[in-house]
Amino acid sequence: MDNVLEEIVARKRIEVEKARSLTPIESIKDRIEEIGRPRNFFRAVVADRRPRNFRVIAEVKRKSPSAGVIREDFDPADIASRYHSGGAAAISCLTDAHYFGGDLGYILRIKDRVPLPVLRKDFIVDEYQVWESRAAGADAILLIAEVLSEGQIIDYQILATELGMTSLVEVHSIDNLYRVLNHVGFPHAGYSLLGVNNRDLSTMTTDLAHTFRVLDLVEDPRVLVSESGIRTVDDLRRLREHGINIALVGEHLMREPDPGAALAELLADIDSSPRD
């Protein structure tokens, strides 16, 4: 397939069926009853009406289809701990094994080390994965509009809310943004965020300006998360100038010798900048 996203989703559907056959959903539900309540991902990253520091969701990622292996010395719990020390508001953890070098088990390893809420970042294509995410300790899930129908997005948001998790509803194209706009904040305010992915998942190219092109369509920029292509304090300043105060940053930090120190430097520079 020329389209990388189609290839990933096709493989993911096979993986889900295999997981379902190995671990029936009843076993997943039993496991959920044994773990504690999820941490509040939404509250950790969304500013109230008063001025507040910039919030970074720092990503734990070993590799990607576009970049290849990003970090050889990969210890997800240690990286998350460094992020916590560096001022991260929350953690994003890649759990796809084949394309991103992730693992569902990383979530609890991270949560055992740091008090921050954790987003399971994966390609969710089935309700089974929503249950699976909570059983693995996830506090939030990623729902990618480019791979889900409108009905699936609604159903998965409802289930995630029932399980106490935040949904990060991610879009790239304008058409998909129109599809999901009315569902951000559904079924209850405080349980969903809107992610604008600056990476075109069909070509894996990035452009930070993509966030600004769609901004006029977003009613409440406080729940908007700019994702991908964010590398410098100037990038964060540009986001702040447009009223955006949440960013998901991964590859840039993962390439640094000390990801936490690199994050602390970014945040120190942006939070010392004058606010409008």
Image: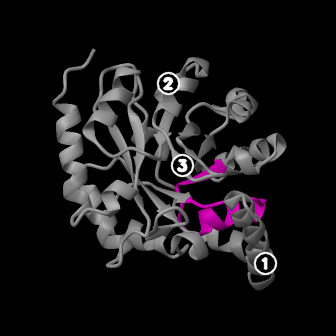
Q: CA distance from mark 1 to mark 2?
A: 40 Å
Q: In this picture, which residue range is highlighted in magenta?
A: 121-143
Image position of 46 (left or right of 176): left
Q: Quadrant of residue 261?
A: bottom left
Q: Is residue 123 above or below residue 153?
A: below
Q: Residue furthest front?
A: 2
Q: Which residue in the protein does label 2 denote?
A: 221
Residue 205: mark in rendering: 3
Amino acid type at circle 2 is Pro
Looking at the rendered image, the quarter that the N terminus falls into is bottom right
**Residue 179, percent from left and from top:** 76, 32
Q: Quadrant of residue 47?
A: top left
How many other residues sit within 10 Å of disc 1, few (<14), some (14-19) or many (≥20)?
few
Residue 24: mark in rendering: 1
Image position of 235 (left or right of 27): left
| Residue at image location 66% in from the left, 52% down from the top | 202
**Residue 96, percent from left and from top:** 59, 70
Q: CA distance from mark 3 to mark 1?
A: 38 Å
Give the mark nearest the N terminus, 3 or 2: 3
Amino acid type at circle 3 is Thr
Q: CA distance from mark 3 to mark 2?
A: 24 Å
**Residue 121, percent from left and from top:** 55, 58
Q: Helix, strand or loop at disc 3?
A: strand
Looking at the rendered image, the quarter that the C terminus falls into is top left
User: Which-is-in-front pick, marks 1 and 2?
Assistant: 2
Q: Residue furthest top?
A: 276
